[in-house]
Image (spheres, rainbow, N blue to C red):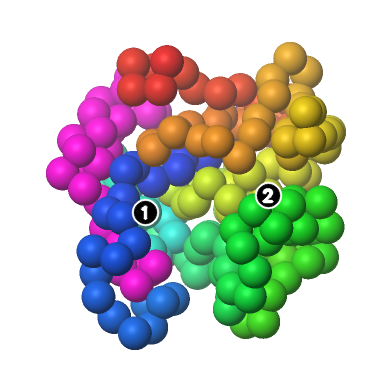
Amino acid sequence: MTTIYLIRHSEKLKKGIIQNNDFELDTKAMTLTVEGERLAKELSDIPELSKVEKIYSSPYARSVATAKYLAAKLNLDIYLDSRLEEIKTGKKTMDNKTFNYLREHDFDFKLEDGESFYDVQKRMTEVFHEICESNQNKTIAIFSHHFALFILLMNFCEIRYIEDQLTLCYRDLNITLKWASPDIYKLEIEQDNIINLEHVVYSMNA
């Protein structure tokens, strides 16, 4: 059985702290707050993660900064892959409420220079399958971002709208776009089939 921990990065600096004219560069450069560093270190001490044998991460600073503590604790390298990056928003031409409604109800919707949910699903699914194929019967940690990970989980869940909120449903588990920083979901795979998906609840996000 292959076990995959999907981990959202820890608490990041707010947009505007880093000043640069290139918004995408700003987004990638956002690292962790002091509290985020503390939470990332605490996350590395979770007993369940002590079995991790390989670590993959988005190249974004906040993702690597979260992964580094587990990597150091387990003496593992961090393998970066750009396909694990967060969804690219693009050039915002509307208010946030309208934008969020459109992309959460039409998975093909995207702005200029941005990505749709389906665009992200394609790249996230591709890298996920590659990771699974090259690490069969191992325990893996993937550090990424909440939209990217949520969209990946669309592959394994029933998609519903509960009180008009996009929700992924797997057995008794309901997953929305409201994730903690950091946050963990655990996938178990056997012979290319998902046999279990669960939210790993611990002291930080209980």
Label 2 secondary element: helix
N-terminal label among 2 and 1: 1
**Which secondary structure type mostly characterizes the magenta part of the structure?**
helix
Write down the residue under mark 2. Answer: 151
Does residue 114 show up? no
Write down the residue under mark 1. Answer: 63
Give the amino acid at mark 1: Ser
On the rendered structure, is 4 left or right of 176? left
On the rendered structure, is 28 left or right of 154? left
> Which portion, as a residue range, is magenta?
26-52
Does residue 99 show up? yes
CA gap, disc 2 and disc 1:
17 Å
Q: At which x and y percent is residue 99?
A: 68, 61
- Residue 35 is a magenta residue: yes
Decide which of 186, 51 is in the foreground and name it: 186
Give the amino acid at mark 2: Ile
Decide which of 195, 154 is in the foreground and name it: 154
